[in-house]
Amino acid sequence: MSTVRRLVIDVLKPHEPSLLEFTTQLSGIESVEGVTSSLIELDQEVQNVKLTFEGEDVSFDTIKERIESLGATVHSIDQVACGEYIVTDRRTLQDG
């Protein structure tokens, strides 16, 4: 079975912890070599955040557990990259 090298997920999180603290906590997960967070939308109750994780064998289950322990929920998995290396997306004629 191929290992997951990149995982992009959409998360709904409360305002606390801050995005900085939230991302710092997620970066400490053993299978994660790096994580980037981007604020997509902000409302009075929650923040909608896109998280991109990279590593040699990223564990979705471990990431999901940590996210939930911080009071957030996974809304969707938006991208997964598996295999020997990460393939860069390229625009095609079908993309318009």
Image: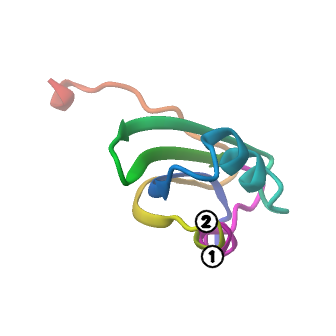
Query: Which portion, as a residue range, is magenta?
Result: 54-67
Q: What's the mark number on residue 67?
A: 2
Find residue 82 and report its horizontal and vertical position in percent.
Answer: 59, 56
Is 92 on the left-hand or right-hand side of 66? left
Residue 55, magenta (yes or no): yes
Q: Quadrant of residue 86?
A: top right
Callout 2 crowding tier (Cα within 10 Å): few <14, some 14–19, many ≥20: many
Q: Quadrant of residue 20?
A: top right
Q: Amino acid at mark 2?
A: Ile
Find residue 70 and report its horizontal and vertical position in percent.
Answer: 64, 65
Q: Decide: is 66 above or below 43.
A: below
Q: What's the mark number on residue 61?
A: 1
Residue 77, magenta (yes or no): no
Which element carries disc 1, helix, strand or loop?
helix
Q: Residue at x 17, y 31 (%)?
A: 94
Q: Decide: is 95 above or below 3.
A: above
Per the model, the C-alpha gap separating discs 2 and 1 is: 10 Å
Is 6 on the left-hand or right-hand side of 80? right
Q: Residue at x 46, y 65 (%)?
A: 74
Which element carries disc 2, helix, strand or loop?
helix
Location of the C terminus by quadrant is: top left
Is 47 on the left-hand or right-hand side of 20? left
Query: Which residue is more in the foreground, 7 or 20?
Result: 20
Location of the N terminus by quadrant is: bottom right
Q: Residue at x 64, y 52 (%)?
A: 17
Among the two numbered marks 2 and 1 on one chain, the one whose residue lies closer to the N terminus: 1
Closer to the eye: label 2 or 1: 2
Find residue 27 and report its horizontal and vertical position in percent.
Answer: 77, 50
Q: Residue at x 55, y 46 (%)?
A: 51
Query: Which residue is more in the foreground, 96 or 31?
Result: 31
Q: Amino acid at mark 1?
A: Asp
Is 15 on the left-hand or right-hand side of 77? right
